[in-house]
Amino acid sequence: PTPPPNPAPHGTLTLNSGKAYANSSTVSARITNSGGPATTYALSVGAQTMNGQWSPDGAGGQTISVSLPATSSCQATTVTGTLTGPGGTASFSASITYDGDVQATATSMNPNLASNNRPIGGTQPLAMTLSYGDKQFTNEPLALLYIDPLPGECSGINGYFIGAASDSVSSPTDARWVPFQAGTAGVINIPPAIQDGQSYSFKVFLRDAAGNVMGSGQDASVSYDTTVPNVSGSSVPATGSGAGNDVAHLDLTGVQVSDTTYQQMTGKAYWGVSIVVTDQPTIDGADPRWTQAGVVNQGVLGASLDWNLYFANSVQPTVPGKSYYVHLRFVDGAGNVSSSVVNSTGVTPLAFSSLKTLFVPLITH
């Protein structure tokens, strides 16, 4: 009788042990045969072709090295191949993406900012209280760490650790790595040795899913500031102006603001000013109207301030013929607010006819 024909080979290809990404342009290519006997193999990637003899028994598997094209970073490369034997030729292929380095940024964030909306690991964001401040400052013994991949990061960040400023490269298996999940924030714990008015310098090391490590780390720092701005002068004269006498012109020449910490670190006496308008000559710093109706403007005020009495007015609807007062508190970049309040004298609008005009302080950098 005629012997049955040999079945064709059946080849499969596994690149880099089945991982979707490689951090080296040279990857392992494992060819296995689960079909009929094979005698030769061929692999092709780009213009590169590799040929060889199959194992003597015609089965089993073989591992060879394949060089990915130099231009394949963040682009999938497909390797094709064939197994040929007495029963015919079988084709197969596999794809892999080369990711040669970590592409991401790490930024320290003031934990008090209301704009912080990233969960801390698997928990919800911290209880944010402020919508203003400098992201590089904090008045708590911690700050948040925002990690954001750049367009060239294709495998994604999967780990980070915060090291000392003198730290060097860490291996991908260093025990200090913390798992990272996109859209979350890490916590930077400021050591107890860092005192008020000092900056904590550190390095952030990042690792991506391809196994790349940011070798030299990214230098970063956060400034620790718990000192509130000091204000001299609690009352300032105000005169009415505008079409309806509804713009208060505040003479601030008698107000002096100093901050031993923020001023020493930035050269500015304060970061900004919190403003609210009421129908009372004075207001307490803990009054909820500061947050319910008030506004915060960044920048240092000049010798005077023109403020439209309609804006940040806690009394709604506003009433012509009634006296209104502008109240000021001064804020530094860490979110510390002056304990004393500067109150203006009263201004009585005849009409609120300047509603389309908002007078704001000059913002300087």
Image (cartoon, rainbow, N blue to C red):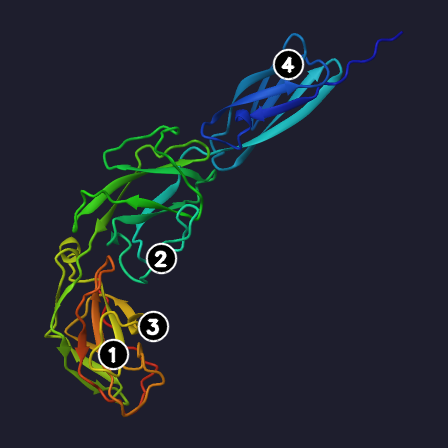
Q: Secondary structure at mark 3?
A: helix
- State the separation of the CA atoms marked 1 and 3: 18 Å
**Front of the two marks 1 and 3:** 3
Q: Amino acid at mark 4?
A: Gly
Q: Residue 204, image x and y in percent?
A: 31, 39
Q: Amino acid at mark 2?
A: Ala
Residue topped by disc 4: 60
**Front of the two marks 2 and 4:** 2
Residue topped by disc 1: 307
Q: Residue 246, image x and y in percent?
A: 27, 86
**Front of the two marks 2 and 1:** 2
Residue topped by disc 3: 292
Numbered circle sitting on residue 127: 2
Quarter holding the N terminus is: top right
Q: Is residue 223 left or right of residue 108?
A: left
| Sequence-wise first label, 2 or 3 | 2
| Sequence-wise first label, 1 or 3 | 3
Quarter holding the C terminus is: bottom left
| Sequence-wise first label, 2 or 4 | 4
Q: Is residue 101 above or below residue 109?
A: above
Question: In which image quadrant can residue 266 be found?
Answer: bottom left
| Sequence-wise first label, 4 or 3 | 4
- State the separation of the CA atoms marked 2 and 3: 17 Å
- State the separation of the CA atoms marked 2 and 1: 31 Å
Q: Is residue 183 above or below residue 13?
A: below
Q: Amino acid at mark 3?
A: Gln
Q: Amino acid at mark 1?
A: Trp
CB-based contact (under 8 Å), mark 2 and mark 3: no
Callout 1 crowding tier (Cα within 10 Å): few <14, some 14–19, many ≥20: many
- State the separation of the CA atoms marked 2 and 4: 60 Å
Question: Which of 317/10 is in front?
Answer: 317
- State the separation of the CA atoms marked 4 and 3: 74 Å
